[in-house]
Image (cartoon, rainbow, N blue to C red):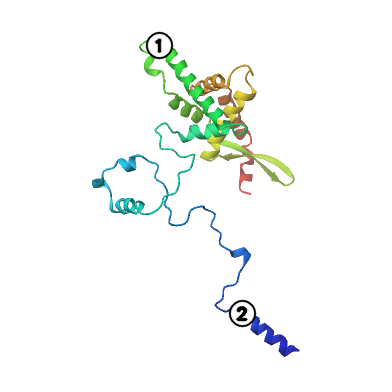
Amino acid sequence: MAASMVERLEVAGRRLHSSRKVWLPGLTQVRWSRYSAIYLDPEVNKEAYRKPPEQLSEEEKAERELKTVRPIKAAPSCVTSSVFYDPLISKFTSIMMMGGNKLLARSLMNQTLEAIKRKQLEKYHKSDEKERGNIECNPYTIFHQALKNCEPIIGLVNIQKGGRSYQVPTPLKDNRRRFLSMRWMITECRENKHYRTYMPEKLSDELLAAFHNEGPIIKKKHEMHKMAEANRAFAHFRWW
């Protein structure tokens, strides 16, 4: 009986160590992409095509020749080669979108930038010659600077220690800073403003106020910094 069991184990060992592959469901390789490995990534930058062949390096020449004989993947819907494309505005539009209505969110964003432009031009023409040089009329510059002014540097993280909950001050990453500034801006316009005022009007007013370091969002950022300063005694809990 023992000899037959040993023979069975030897046969099973030979099967496992044979050249034949064993199917294991946990180690099966799955290709999630719809494109095979021979497809190349698309080039959406127009400047890459405007460069003359004399200025191309050997690697760029080889890559360009390879693209003439290899298939190329389709560009994602969120990527464009337009000169008016701004990734920060695109991110803000996606956060502002409700119910998957991206067309409405884009329309509101365009109306907001137009309202900022109109208000700044009106202010520009009413001001004196000396003050006109200090008035910014580019809505893209105002939008970027306004969100930059609203970004907090230090935030609070809820940490459980010894059965108690502590608000621990923690430095924030760049992505988290931008997200907080966008969320505060959208929440302020939706919840704390009059419901009869249209969204582009409310958003343009808040962006112009934040551009000049004024408004409730700047105040909210300072309050977060004050709370982090008050809880600095719990900063050592950050290394948990």
Q: Is residue 207 left or right of residue 5?
A: left
Q: Which amino acid type is shown beneath numbered disc 1?
A: His
> Which amino acid does the dot numbered 2 rest on?
Arg
Residue 63 in sight here: yes
Q: Residue at x 58, y 23 (%)?
A: 216
Q: Using the image as rendered, state which of residue 223 and residue 29 is in the foreground.
A: 29
Q: Earlier in the sequence, mark 2 or mark 1?
A: 2
Residue identified by numbered label 2: 15
Element on which disc 2 rests: helix
- State the image coordinates of residue 187 (x, y, percent, origin top left): 61, 27
**Seen in the image, is 102 located left or right of residue 43?**
right
- The reply to whether callout 2 and callout 1 are in contact (CB within 8 Å) is no
Q: Position of residue 141 (x, y in %)?
A: 43, 27
In the rendered image, the vertical position of residue 127 relative to residue 26, given as above or below? above
Q: Residue at x 63, y 81 (%)?
A: 13
Q: Quadrant of residue 157?
A: top right
Q: Which quadrant of the structure image shows residue 238?
A: top right
Question: Residue 125, labelled with which disc?
Answer: 1
**Viewport quadrant of the N terminus:** bottom right
- In the rendering, at what x and y percent does residue 225 appear? 58, 32
